[in-house]
Amino acid sequence: MLGQIAGSSLAQKGMTRWLLNGLALLMLVSTTAHAAENDDLATNSKFSRDTVIDLARKLASSAYKPPRADLPESLSNLSNKQYRDIRFDPTKAIWAGQNLPFELELYHRGGIYKDPVEIALVEDGAARHLAYDPAMFKTGENLTTPLPSQDIGFAGFRLKSPLNRPDTYEDTAIFLGATYFRAVAKNQVFGMSARGLAIKTADPEGEEFPIYRAFWIEKPSQDTNSIVINALLDSKSVAGAYRFTIRPGTNTTMDVEATLFPRTDLTKVGLAPETSMYLFSANDRANIDDYRPQVHDSDGLLMLNGRGERLWRPLANPTKLQISAFQDTAPMGFGLMQRARNFVNYQDLDANFQSRPSLWIEPLGNWGKGAVVLTEIPSDAQIHDNTIAYWAPGTPIKAGTSFNYSYRLSWGTGPTIAPGEARVYSTRSGRVNPTQQDNKRTFVVDYTIPDQSVPMPQTLPHATVKSSQGNISNVSVRENPQTGGYRVTFQMDPGGAELAELRLELKFDDARKAETWMYRWTN
């Protein structure tokens, strides 16, 4: 069921730096010294749902040409500090003062954000090119050179909406860097990211990072709660058309409709990829010298497979690159979750990890056979996004064909759970005997029943624990009065194994469901 752990060679080749501050390396990959002609994609023209699909099909019919490299040297070499000194003037926001449910602000090109992004505004079936204007931006004392006057495009944009207060527009979604985008729900702060497409993730030959070359943003009406964004994806291997319907709220949802036109056979492709940061938690604090109990944007991978089984896999920060593949047919959902929601879990007044969103992905339609792939990259700092999850189709997507798929992203606190259903609350482990230098481990897995609208069980559930290597002993289940749920404890002796896959199933006499806990132990 699970893919095998990858060797250490990839990590030694610098995989931990592939997402420097989430974006730096991917921008170096996507930007080349060979410039294409000016793209002129998001132009003044008629617009329909088929416009971007037709452009993607046309792009894919010829060899890939990288974006134009027309960024002045004064902007190309900006430090992070200098780049942050270029700020969009909120008085120049698109649709400002029109009493619409959204406003739009732009990001300037510069620093690691070198690639130009074209933007058009769509209204009444017509697209209007949004030209760059230096007057849209303010600069601070760290930037000593003037901004260019020619139309250099943008790096990306952010959507603002009255998410938490009806009289205040706040950052709701950000599209910035390659095909990365982020969003938040009510009372949350930005954390993990999603991407349009993943190609050759953790591949020894290097990852391919597609980019969004252009966006067509449809003007919302006053009486709507949604906005539609169309995007044109491009890379060496594939071109594609994406359509996002975004609805902010308690959970901010994005309905995504995508059509891919591969230039080459896509044999190592990830659909609906998401990227997060996991440094440490209560489960793996070995050699951690930090006042904070936990540091992460996500603490586990949740899956609802085609059989209706909920699987919970706690995340890890491994010493070697790890890749796990969870085989499935017609998956119902998956996503990286942030379950620890109390400030005491983190004790970080600045990062507010407890308020960062989970991201749940729900395929719309039958995605067939494939696998949810989890990649965990060794990391020693919280600036690195070192955790990636996506759906890998079971068969290659052939060159010269078109491939349609759709899905829903929900940014918030995770999917709803049925009344009375038990879910994993936390995972902890440590040596059986702390005075002995062996690998015998004690595991403590806490379950809670978040929705107790149905009567609680009258008897204790039964726990079954299995391991691919070694021996399991001393399995016990008891009530946990601190959480109102149950605590499962057991011991594992891996023997001489270097890796073991653990699986815990909790069964109730009244047949209520519980998540299946899965864990990868490594020496």
Image (cartoon, rainbow, N blue to C red):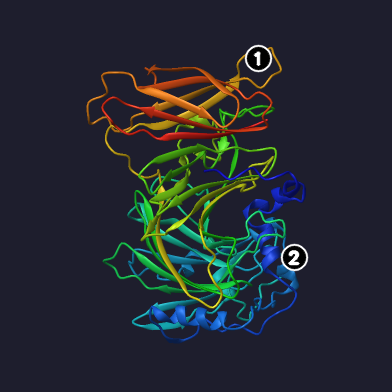
Q: Residue 242, percent across and down? A: 46, 70
Q: Quadrant of residue 405?
A: bottom left
Q: Which residue is mark 1?
A: 434
Q: Amino acid at mark 2?
A: Asn
Decide which of 303, 107 is in the foreground and name it.
303
470 in relation to 403, above or below: above
Callout 1 secondary element: loop
Q: Quadrant of residue 320?
A: top right
- State the separation of the CA atoms marked 1 and 2: 51 Å
Query: Which residue is at 26% across, 27% downward?
Result: 510
The answer to whether residue 223 is left or right of residue 500 is: left
Q: Is residue 483 visible?
A: no
Callout 2 secondary element: loop
| Comes first in the chain, label 1 or label 2 | 2
Q: Residue furthest bottom?
A: 45
511 in relation to 434, above or below: below
Q: Which residue is mark 2?
A: 77
Query: Which residue is at 35% across, 27% downward?
Result: 507
370 in relation to 418, above or below: below
Q: Amino acid at mark 1?
A: Pro
Q: Residue 216, percent across and down? A: 45, 75
The answer to whether residue 460 is left or right of residue 114 is: left
Res. 126 mark: none
Identify the image quadrant of the C terminus: top right
Q: Is residue 358 visible?
A: yes
The answer to whether residue 463 is left or right of residue 111 is: left
Decide which of 131, 467 is in the foreground and name it.
467
Q: Residue 430, percent across and down? A: 60, 21
